[in-house]
Image (cartoon, helix red, strand yellow):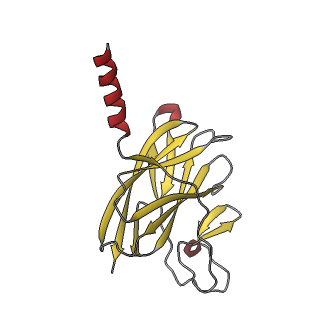
Amino acid sequence: MTILWCVILLAFTACQQGRTPLPMRGMPLLVEGLESPDDIIPTPGGWAYRANVHQQGVENPWPPIESTSIVLGSGADTLNISYRDYIETEAGGIKNNIIRAGKEGGLFDSRLALYSVVVPAGIELSDGGRGVGLPGTLGTILVIEISPDVTPGQYSFEIGLEIDGRDYGTVPCAIKVTD
């Protein structure tokens, strides 16, 4: 019987290897004169990237930030996820990634939690806050901090989503650190 429990425990812990809940923190403060295209701006439709918010009569200096869509789950528990799967930045930078989750019939009174899997050294992830979507959707800001010591190159990791304690799996992310 003891051997059976050891096998079950080993199988369970092997599945959890590398899985780290993301700590909550506030979004990076906006600093006047140091605008970045992926600064988070409040809009009537929820949070948006500064590059995607246009003021009439003012030229936008940045190209729009594109998000990708992916489906997690199946059947009645299918989630539609929108997020940035590829980001370029310099070492020492902080980038924001708006992650939105929607489901047929909506997600009301639900809790979203993020976790990471196999994040490379020198890259720190945190959950920057909630309330980024339209009614019936869940969302958060993934804050990505790149150490100034990170060697230029492309780094991959995965972000997992749990809603109301149910693990929906992970989405792939890539960070290209430039000189």
Of 101 and 170, the residue lying toward us: 170
6 sits to left or right of 36:
left
Residue positioned 35% across, 52% down in the render: 118
Does residue 68 sit above or below 1 in this rendering? Answer: below
Residue 104 percent location from the top left of the image = 58, 40
Of 85 and 93, the residue lying toward us: 93
Residue positioned 30% across, 67% down in the render: 154
Residue positioned 59% across, 74% down in the render: 50
Residue 12 percent location from the top left of the image = 36, 31
The residue lying furthest to the front in this view is 2
Residue positioned 36% across, 46% down in the render: 18
Does residue 147 sit above or below 168 in this rendering? Answer: below
Residue 127 percent location from the top left of the image = 55, 56
**Image quadrant where one finds the C terminus:** bottom left
Does residue 169 sit above or below 91 in this rendering? Answer: above
How many marks the image carries: the answer is 0
**Image quadrant where one finds the N terminus:** top left
Residue 92 percent location from the top left of the image = 43, 75
Does residue 146 sit above or below 133 in this rendering? Answer: below
